Image (tube, rainbow, N blue to C red):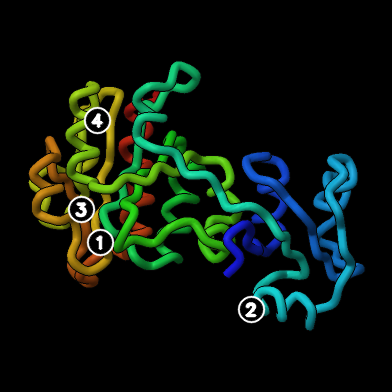
Amino acid sequence: MNSSFEYIYGPHSVLSCIKASKRKIYEIFIIKGNKNTKEIEALALKKKIQITYSDKNHLFSLLRTKNHQGVCARVSYLPELSLNNILDTTEKTYDFIVILDNIEDPRNFGAIVRSAFCLGADAVIIPEKRSSSPSPLVSKVSAGAIEYIDIVSVVNIAKALDELKKNGYWAAGLAAEGSINIGELDIAAPFCLVIGNEGSGIRKLVREKCDWLVNIPQGTLVSSLNASVAAGIGIYELVKKIKR
């Protein structure tokens, strides 16, 4: 893989990338006559971004997927922040942070990022290893939301929680066996919600750093919620308490 760029695809991903202006866009490839790309073309022309009109075979040769909806872009990699960028900033307030403890499925990661951005979270923290990370697929699944929300990469989630708590953050872990109904938790900013791995949940050491373990009440017909669905509900329930 070339270390200087990647290809993102789909109208939402490409349009969000242009609007967010977080990374360099080298070239946009569009299947001519595509009705979904009028705004992309207009913005690209305004910003003097090169547009190449192509066909579906060429796009497939670049992407190795047919799920591009007629547009892709060659772009620099999405910048990831460090925890110090969050703790030391004076430019932005990070009242609500979502922490992903080894979410491995890029589709779950993308869906959680989309929920986090749309519902008002300020950043998403992920571990450097054994975790899904920003990618063209994640960008597509997130419908471009990953271009707007801050993604923070850390070496160790437990140590990151220690640092956050030293700086006044409270933390809740979302777990099926949590003893507190998430709707009944009374919280204040700044706050973190921890989402665990799709299969094994939140790791023991990370659990111990949480101030509470909270659950989403469920019926008995299905054993558990999908990780991204549970995350969306959890983010909604807690962000509205922080930002009401």
Spot occupied by residue 234 in the image (x, y as percentages of width and height): 31, 46
Asked whether disc 2 touches disc 1, contact meaning CB atoms under 8 Å apart, the reply is no
Identify which amino acid the numbered label 2 is placed on: Thr
Could you say whether the residue bearing mark 2 is in a helix, strand or loop?
loop
* Earlier sequence position, callout 2 versus callout 1: 2
* Earlier sequence position, callout 3 versus callout 4: 4
What residue sits right under mark 1 in the picture?
A: 197
Task: Check the picture and name the quadrant holding the N terminus.
Answer: bottom right
Could you say whether the residue bearing mark 4 is in a helix, strand or loop?
helix
Q: Nearer the observer, disc 3 or disc 4? A: 4
What residue sits right under mark 2 in the picture?
A: 65
What's the mark number on residue 216? none
Spot occupied by residue 73 in the image (x, y as percentages of width and height): 73, 60
Task: Check the picture and name the quadrant holding the C terminus.
Answer: top left
Q: Who is closer to the viewer here, 176 or 93?
A: 93
Identify which amino acid the numbered label 3 is placed on: Pro
Q: Who is closer to the viewer here, 241 or 26?
A: 26
**Residue density around tag 3, few if under 14, some if 14–19, many if 20 or more, within 10 Å:** few
* Earlier sequence position, callout 2 versus callout 4: 2
Identify which amino acid the numbered label 4 is placed on: Leu
What residue sits right under mark 3 in the picture?
A: 217
Identify which amino acid the numbered label 1 is placed on: Asn
Image point (77%, 70%), residue name: 70
What's the mark number on residue 164? 4
